[in-house]
Image (cartoon, rainbow, N blue to C red):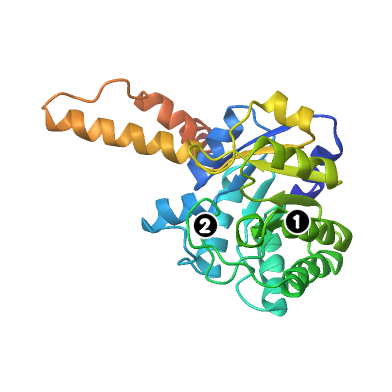
């Protein structure tokens, strides 16, 4: 079964899907080891981890698909990739969708921001017009229908730029075009989240950004509201940032950092036992 087929089965199941987001092979592997059913390559976290840059459209298609290929090879989980605006016009969107499918992604997110885009919970967002937004999603869906083995997540940031009515209008249009997952970014109240779930059919994703614009709600409440997926795009990155800064401060005092994972555990996570076993298989006596 392909990654896309696995993702589609998850969407068709009765289960609510908690989706911690990753940024490299190791973080993806940790999500899998913890027992989650899927993960998402967070553009914000990739930009931070790979280049220490803000999520403002500074990374190219090539950099993102390269990072994604490494992530998909590190885990057996279905991975949804952040495809930003599709990196150009409709033909660029189609190529981006095809490239993400070839890299091993189960799904790709395409959004309606003006390029270069930025994190949905930071200031300065702008969105393209309604027709161009629909054209992007149509191109992505066409690429899927023409053979790219990948699901399409359609995102709108229009809540902040043009208001909730326009955002709902776009979500309905994206659903009619054939998007597999619908993502209204940054609703600013529980009431707006409820409206999205009430007025839009299909699989819907909630973006749970710590200290972001959207209320962070418990999984059960999100499920009861009508969401299918809860994404946690920054949880692992924020945890890593705090742990690394703490360790560096402890080193300054001359003390060895406390509460570290063991070296043996690190070796286990990144696959030394499997490597040793394979090495023995090809050992010459």
> Looking at the figure, which quarter contains the N terminus?
top right
Instruction: Choose top left, top right, bottom left or bottom right for residue 112.
Output: bottom right
> Can residue 281 be seen at all in this image of the molecule?
no
Q: In the rendered structure, which disc, 1 or 2, sits on the residue that comes first in sequence?
A: 2
Q: Which residue is drawn at 64% across and 39% down?
A: 189
Q: Residue at x 86, y 39 (%)?
A: 12
Q: Give the answer, above or below, for where 65 lies relative to 24.
A: below
22 and 128: which one is in front? 128
**Which residue corresponds to mark 2?**
67
Which numbered circle lies on residue 165? 1
Q: Residue furthest top?
A: 259
Instruction: Choose top left, top right, bottom left or bottom right for residue 98.
Output: bottom right
Coordinates of residue 87 in the picture (x, y in percent): 60, 72
Are dots 1 and 2 in contact, CB under 8 Å?
no
Coordinates of residue 183 in the picture (x, y in percent): 71, 50
What is the count of numbered marks?
2
Q: Is 184 placed left or right of 56 in the picture? A: right
Marks 1 and 2: which is nearer the front? 1
Q: How dense is the environment of label 1, judged by Cα within 10 Å: few (below 14), some, or many (20 and up)?
A: few
Coordinates of residue 186 in the picture (x, y in percent): 61, 48
Say what secondary structure mark 1 lies in: helix
> Can residue 211 be seen at all in this image of the molecule?
yes
Q: Residue at x 77, y 45 (%)?
A: 196
How far apart in space, not on screen, are marks 1 and 2 (Cα)? 36 Å
225 and 104: which one is in front? 225
Q: Which residue is drawn at 66% across and 50% down?
A: 80
Which numbered circle lies on residue 113? none
């Amino acid at each position: 079964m392909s990654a896309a087929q696995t993702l589609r089965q998850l969407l068709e199941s009765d289960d609510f899907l908690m989706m911690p987001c990753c940024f490299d092979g190791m973080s993806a592997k940790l999500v899998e080891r913890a027992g989650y059913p899927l993960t998402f390559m967070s553009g914000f976290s990739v930009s931070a981890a790979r280049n220490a840059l803000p999520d403002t459209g500074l990374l190219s298609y090539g950099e993102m698909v390269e990072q994604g290929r490494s992530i998909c090879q590190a885990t057996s989980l279905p991975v949804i990739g952040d495809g930003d605006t599709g990196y150009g016009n409709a033909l660029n969107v189609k190529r981006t969708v095809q490239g993400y499918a070839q890299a091993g992604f189960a799904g790709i997110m395409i959004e309606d921001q003006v390029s270069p885009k930025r994190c949905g919970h930071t200031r300065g967002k702008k969105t393209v017009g309604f027709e161009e937004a629909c054209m992007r999603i149509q191109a992505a869906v066409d690429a899927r229908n023409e053979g790219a083995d990948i699901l399409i997540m359609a995102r709108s940031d229009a809540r902040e730029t043009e208001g909730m009515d326009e955002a709902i209008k776009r979500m309905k249009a994206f659903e009619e075009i054939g998007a597999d997952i619908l993502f209204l970014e940054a609703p600013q109240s529980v009431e707006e989240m409820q409206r999205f779930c009430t007025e839009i059919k299909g699989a819907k994703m909630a973006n749970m950004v710590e200290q972001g614009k959207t209320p962070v709600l418990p999984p059960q409440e999100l499920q009861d509201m009508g969401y299918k997926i809860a994404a946690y795009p920054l949880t692992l990155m924020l945890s890593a940032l705090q742990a690394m800064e703490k360790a560096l401060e402890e080193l300054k005092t001359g003390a060895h950092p406390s509460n570290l994972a063991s070296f043996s555990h690190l070796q286990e996570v990144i696959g030394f036992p499997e490597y040793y076993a394979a090495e023995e298989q090809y050992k010459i006596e």
